[in-house]
Image: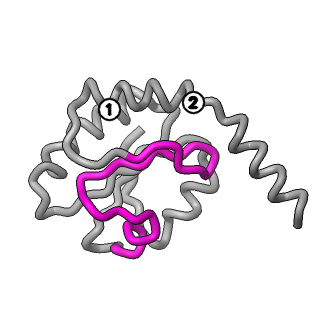
């Protein structure tokens, strides 16, 4: 699967309609961000069951602000609409692979329980 360009128009819908999304926050002037793009794209190719998306923080600063992204490059791992891991700074392919491996194994029980409790209290 190719990497999606996420923006205000499609971010929420993407998160709500996919159980596993990894977001790369970047900007064109950020050299480490630009260097990371091929690594991110390669991970997307190796993991077609995960949605990979990139948010240009210059074009859509509101998304980064909402998630309190103060430094880039930054990665946000979202499972079932919940952010389960945030990573700031330069990383290589082996580190990204480890994050993906960890995120696949992450136990969603507490998050699902929280969602159920929230739904029941409405």
On the rendered image, what quadrant is the C terminus found in? bottom right
Read off the magenta span.
Answer: 61-86
**Residue 62 magenta:** yes
**Residue in view at x 76 percent, y 51 percent:** 115
Q: Secondary structure under badge 2? A: loop
Looking at the picture, the colour scheme in use is one colour
The residue wearing badge 1 is 96
- In this rendering, the answer to whether 87 lies above or below 28 is above
Of labels 1 and 2, the one closer to you:
2
What is the number of the mark on residue 55?
Answer: none
Residue 31 in the image, given as x and y percentages of width and height: 9, 53
Quadrant assignment, res 100:
top left
- In this rendering, the answer to whether 23 lies above or below 45 is below
- In this rendering, the answer to whether 51 lies above or below 12 is above
Residue 93 in the image, given as x and y percentages of width and height: 24, 29
Q: CA distance from mark 1 to mark 2?
A: 15 Å
Mark 1 and mark 2 lie on one chain; the one further toward the N terminus is 1
Left or right: 30 as drawn, with respect to 72:
left
On the rendered image, what quadrant is the N terminus found in? top left
**Residue in view at x 24 percent, y 52 percent:** 73
Residue 67 in the image, given as x and y percentages of width and height: 44, 63
**Residue in view at x 30 percent, y 64 percent:** 70
**Residue 25 magenta:** no
Left or right: 46 as drawn, with respect to 120:
left
The residue wearing badge 2 is 106
**Residue in view at x 58 percent, y 43 percent:** 79
Is the residue marked by circle 1 packed among few (<14), some (14-19), or many (20+) residues within 10 Å? some
Residue 58 in the image, given as x and y percentages of width and height: 25, 72
Left or right: 63 as drawn, with respect to 73:
right
The residue lying toward the viewer, choosing from 111 and 50, is 111
Q: Secondary structure under badge 1? A: helix
């Amino acid at each position: 699967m190719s990497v999606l360009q996420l923006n205000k128009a499609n971010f929420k819908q993407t998160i709500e309609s996919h159980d596993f999304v990894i977001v790369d926050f970047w900007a064109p002037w950020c050299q480490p961000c630009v260097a990371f793009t091929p690594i991110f794209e390669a991970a997307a190719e190796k993991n077609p069951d995960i949605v990979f998306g990139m948010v240009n923080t210059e074009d859509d600063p509101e998304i980064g602000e909402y998630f309190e992204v103060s430094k880039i490059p930054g990665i946000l791992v979202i499972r079932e609409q919940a952010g389960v891991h945030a990573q700031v700074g330069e990383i290589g392919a082996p580190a990204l692979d480890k994050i993906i491996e960890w995120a696949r194994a992450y136990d969603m029980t507490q998050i699902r329980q929280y969602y159920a409790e929230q739904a029941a209290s409405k």
